[in-house]
Image: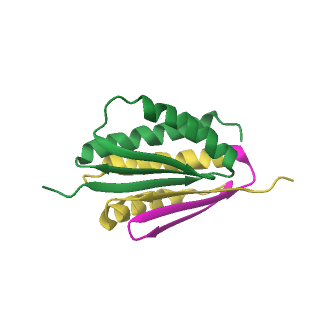
Chain colours: A yellow, B green
Amino acid sequence: MRDPIEGMIEIEFPDEEIAKIVYESVRYEHESVPYRRSRIEFTREGRRIKLRFTAQDSSALRGTLNSYLRWIKVAIDAMEF
Amino acid sequence: MRDPIEGMIEIEFPDEEIAKIVYESVRYEHESVPYRRSRIEFTREGRRIKLRFTAQDSSALRGTLNSYLRWIKVAIDAMEF
């Protein structure tokens, strides 16, 4: 059996207010996904948001990452900063 | 005059080999952009790649970030890991 695949995405925003807005909007998506093939920790510290992920299956991981990157992009596009 | 907008995106990959492949493929795009409205530092350390950016203009920053996120997504999709 292969070792689990682990990784991390961390984004530091210009200020905490922006980080909060992006975090809350992505967290809404994060919590509404009913079924996951990857384990994801999604946290905010000050003006940084962090995704820490673990998966057994690389295609699941890729799909999960792509979803989060898309949600982050949508949140950034929607912001007036 | 507003302060410059600064931020950072850091991605930690499952291993250094994957980080190298994504880094090299995004670096190719990074170096072929002839004109930039944002200043970007793009580096790799071990299995992490990091984008550090500065812009005066938030719409320029948003456009730049979106380009990098898209290139990273394409590189991840193209990988067999």
Q: Can residue B36 be seen in this view?
A: yes
| Residue A50 on image: x %, y % | 51, 62
Point out the stretch of residues depicted in magenta. Answer: A37-60
**Magenta stretch contains residue A38:** yes
Residue closest to the eye, A65 or B40: B40
State the image coordinates of residue A33 (x, y, percent, origin top left): 56, 56
Q: Quadrant of the N terminus of chain B?
A: bottom left
Could you tell me if residue B76 is visible in this image?
no
Which percent across, then down, holds residue B52?
41, 52
Name the residue at the left extreme: B1
**Residue at 25% in and 54% down:** A81
Callout count? 0
User: Residue at position x 57%, y 37% from top?
Assistant: B24
The quarter of the image holding the C terminus of chain B is top right
Decide whether the magenta segment is chiefly helix, strand or loop. strand
Residue that appears at 27% across and 39% down: B37
Q: Where is residue B80 in the image (x, y as percent from the top left)?
A: 71, 37
Displayed quadrant of residue A55: bottom right
- Tell which residue pokes out farthest to the right in this image: A1
* Residue B65 magenta-highlighted: no
